[in-house]
Amino acid sequence: MVTGTKQLQNAMMVVIYTILGLAMIVTLVPFVWLVCATLKTPEIYFKYQFLPLGDGFLGIDWHNLTLANFHDLFFSNEFSFGRNILNSLFYSSCTAVLATLFSAMGGYALAKFEFRFQRLITWVVLSSLIVPGALLIAPGYQLLFNLHLLDTFSALILPAMAPAFGVFLFRQSMINSVPGDLMEAARVDGCGELRLFFTIILPIVRPMIGAFLLITFLGCWNNFIGPQIVLQTPEKFPLAVAIAQLKGLYSTNYGMLMAGTLVSIFPVLALFLLLQKEFIAGLTAGAVKG
């Protein structure tokens, strides 16, 4: 009986790993195609699906592969791709840090303080989650115009500093993860509210901070509509807009376009590898109450 159970478990593990292996292959194929596309010249870009075939090592024509797409992307006088990367890093990093901080503050206030209109404010935050972002483009543009903030990074960062989704997310995390007895004990020992928040509350919700930081950074890094509406100076464009402008009016160097796309993946990939434990823990933080 025990032997039969072990054989069944082994068979199930083989099936599971086979399915996971197939899923991994399906997931990696687009990335492999992307890497191959960055190495092609315009003449052979549409001729071969992946790498050009030939008489070289592994049946590949290595002479038709080139790094000129990356060279032209960074060192051509026509593009300022390095500056666009710095713009995206500045915009995404500042927005992610500030949005995480102010969302945590707002969620902490709604979860652990009792004040007048607390329930009303909570319902306002919840109600704002169902408002489509596209409806806010016109009034948001008019507000930024009246404040003389157009064509500045402040116009992108300030509206995203306290998103309703982040405030509600941290509110739920504070309710489930932060015990009231711990807060009272800290106050009895003379801990001030700011010190209590930064030294006790934030470390407790660290998984949620990592998860929300990554989500916000990724959203800002891939933001395409907002910068096109707010910014007018090409030198201020983030990476997503700069990549879209690699498409020419009469012709497009698709190899360079794919090279720019590949470069744009690396910062997000590095951040995810750095915060993957916090990201997974933050996603599952509310699954078990305790």
Image: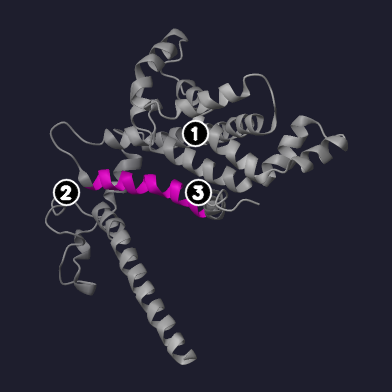
Percent across and percent down for residue 193 are 77, 30
Who comes first in sequence, dot 2 or dot 1?
2
Of the pair 175 and 207, the residue shown nearer to us: 175
Q: Main secondary structure of the magenta part?
A: helix
Element at label 2: loop
Which residue does the image show at 66% across and 46% down from the upper left? 177
At which x and y percent is residue 239? 37, 36
Q: Which residue is mark 1?
A: 165
- Residue 231 is at least partly visible in this image: no
Q: Is residue 201 visible?
A: yes
- Asked whether residue 262 is drawn in magenta, I would say yes
Residue 73 picture quarter:
top left
Q: CA distance from mark 2 to mark 1?
A: 44 Å
Q: Amino acid at mark 2?
A: Pro
Q: Is residue 57 left or right of residue 124?
A: left
Residue 127, how many percent across, how many down?
46, 26
Q: Please name the residue that numbered disc 3 is placed on.
A: 271
Asked if disc 1 and disc 3 are in contact, CB closer than 8 Å, the reply is no
Q: Mark number for residue 180? A: none
